[in-house]
Amino acid sequence: MKIGWGPQTVLAGLASGGAVLVRTDTAIGAYLNAPAACWLRWIVAIGLDGSPGQAALSCLRVWASAGLITLDDQAAILVGDPEIEEYEERGRALRRDLLQRAALFPRVGTPILAVGVGRDCAYCDQLLTDLAANAPLRDGGVVVSGDDRIRLFGAFSGTGLDRLADLPDPASLPETGESTDLPDLPDLADLPELADLAEMARAAAPLGTPSGVLLHPGAPPRILEGYHQVSAMIVSTLGDEPDRVVMETPSSCSVNVTSGEGTSVRPVRAGDRVVGIATRGAVTGELDGWLSAHTADAAYAPATLTVERPRNLYLVYRGGAMIARHRTPADTIACLQTMLAGYADHAGAAEDEADVDCGVLWHPAHGAVLIPNHWLSPMARKSSRLRRSGWQLCPQPYVRLGMRDGQAWARVRPLGEDPRMAPVAFLAVDPPAPAIDERPARTPSTEERAAQLVCWAVRPLTPPHLRALAATAHHIPIRTLGPDPILAQLPDLVLARGADPLKRTRAD
C-alpha cells in the first residue's frame, strides 16, 4: 500500500528530530514529533504493510483529508472511515445534481454566480459585506440565497433581474398565509430566472457555506466551495487575476470590524498587488484624496484593511485585529503606506528567508519581539506607552525572518521609515490552556512552539523558503507569556508609574 507526499506538501525538519508537514499553497500544517516524522518518512519510502494501529490510522486519515499525503486505492480502503466515505459520497451526489441543475439554466449573456449562504456563518457575512461595500459591481452578477433573503449584486443583463436588489427568499415565507412584516414579493412567474438561481444557490450551501455555481457564457458550469474559491471567482469573473488581489481568511471579529453603515471599499495599489481598504464615516472623506490617487484598476477587492474614527482617534484594522491608533490623518496614511509596502514586497524574499504572518514589537537597541496576531489589538491599545519607551508596534502585514552569522534576524517596518533588519530577541506565545475536568494542562514543548512559528508562514511559498524558516525557528528563543505579562519582559519599558492618571488614560 503506497503512501505519497501531497502535490504541494513539504516535510521540514526541526532541530530535535521532529518536523512540520506543511502545504505550500494554503495555511494547512501539522507538527510531528521525532518518532512520527521518522515513521512517516519510512512508510512513504517503502509503503504500508498491514494496519499500523488506530492512532496511526487516524493521523493518516487527517493528513490525507487535508491534502498533506496521498493514498493509493488499497491504502485508502484501509485508512477510510465509513462515516467519512458516506459523507464524501453525499458530496459527490450533491455536486452531480448541482451541475445537472445548472446545465438546464438558460444560456446567460454575462457571468452569473449563484452563492448559497447560511445563518451565523462568519465567512458568509464577510462575503456579503465585501459585495455590498464594493457595489456597484460591473461585468457580472452575484445572487446570494440561503439565509431567508435573496440578494442581487452587479449586472444581470438580459435576465430581467436588474431592478431587484434584496428580497425575501420564497422558501422562507410562511405557507399558512399568516401575516408577515416582509415586503411584497414580485410575481415569481414573471421572474423564473430568480427562482431558479435562488434554488441553485440554496442547493450549493450543503457543500459548506459559502459555496456556489458559476454560469459563464460559452463555458460549462463550475462549482465553487468556500469563501476563498467564491471570492477568487468573483475577482476573476470581473476581469482581474485572483493572485493579484489580496484575500485573507475572515473571522467573526473581522466581520464585526468591516461591517457597518456606510462602509465602502477601494481597491488600492500595493506594487503589483491590490489591497481592499474599507473606510466609513468621516474617514471616507478625509482619506478620499489619498485613496483616489492610489486606486488600482480593479473591479472588486475584499476588505483587508479598515479605517474608522469613532472619536478623536483613527483606528486601523487588518481583518479583525486593530494594528494602530493614530491622532492625525498623516500618521494614518503613513500606516497604510507601510502596510501596502509589506504586501507588495511579499514576493521579494530570498530563498534563505521567509515571511511569517505575525506581529512584531521593535526597539532600536533591543531588537525585535515576535507576537501572535491575536495580540495585536491589546498591543495597539498600549501603543502610546510603548512609544514613550522606544518600542514600536510595527504596522506590517508580515515579518520576514532569516539567519545572519548564527543569529535570527527580522525585517521590520517602523511607522514612516524604511525597512531595516533587527535581531530577534524572542518569540512570545500564549501559556497553555488551563486544566479541564481535573486533568493537568499539557504544556507544548519548545519544538512544538517552533513548529507553530513555521506554520505561520505566508502562503504561497516555496519548499526552500519553508525549510529556511524551519532552520531559523531553531535559533529564536521562546517565552511563554501573554499579551499583558510581556510588558514586564520588555527592557526599558516605561510603566508610567507616578504619572498623571488622567493623562495616562488619554494616552493609553
Image (cartoon, helix red, strand yellow):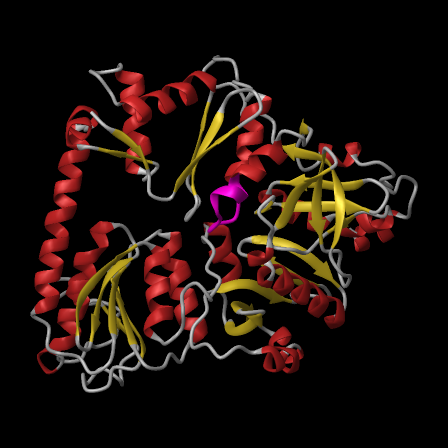
The picture quadrant where one finds residue 154 is bottom left
Quadrant including the N terminus: top left
Taking the image as shown, residue 193 lies to the left or right of residue 163, namely left
Residue 408, image x, y percentages: 70, 37
Above or below, 154 relative to 452: below
Instruction: Return the x and y of residue 107 as percentages of the image width and height.
Output: 13, 78
Residue placed most toward the observer, 264 or 174: 264
Q: Residue at x 76, y 45 (%)?
A: 422
Coordinates of residue 108 in the picture (x, y in percent)? 17, 79
Q: Main secondary structure of the magenta part?
A: loop
> Relative to 399, is 166 on the left or the right?
left
* Residue visible at 52% across and 20% down in the picture: 17
- Give the extent of the magenta segment: 456-466
Q: Is residue 491 left or right of residue 359?
A: right
Q: Residue furthest right?
A: 498
| Residue 465 inside the magenta-drawn segment | yes
Q: Residue at x 52, y 48 (%)?
A: 458
Residue at screen point 57% across, 39% down: 468
Which picture quadrant has residue 179? Answer: bottom left
Q: How many marks?
A: 0
What percent of the width, then of the height, locates residue 433?
A: 54, 25
* Image vertical order of residue 53 relative to residue 18, above or below: above
Q: Nearer the viewer, residue 242 or 194?
A: 242
| Residue located farthest toward the front when viewing the structure as drawn | 46
Q: Quadrant of residue 285?
A: bottom right
Instruction: Using the rendered image of the protein, determine whether residue 456 is visible from the camera's viewpoint.
Output: no
Answer left or right for 43 relative to 27: left
Q: Does residue 255 lie above or below 244 as drawn?
A: above
User: Is residue 485 found inside the magenta-colored segment of the image?
Assistant: no
Q: Is residue 276 visible?
A: yes
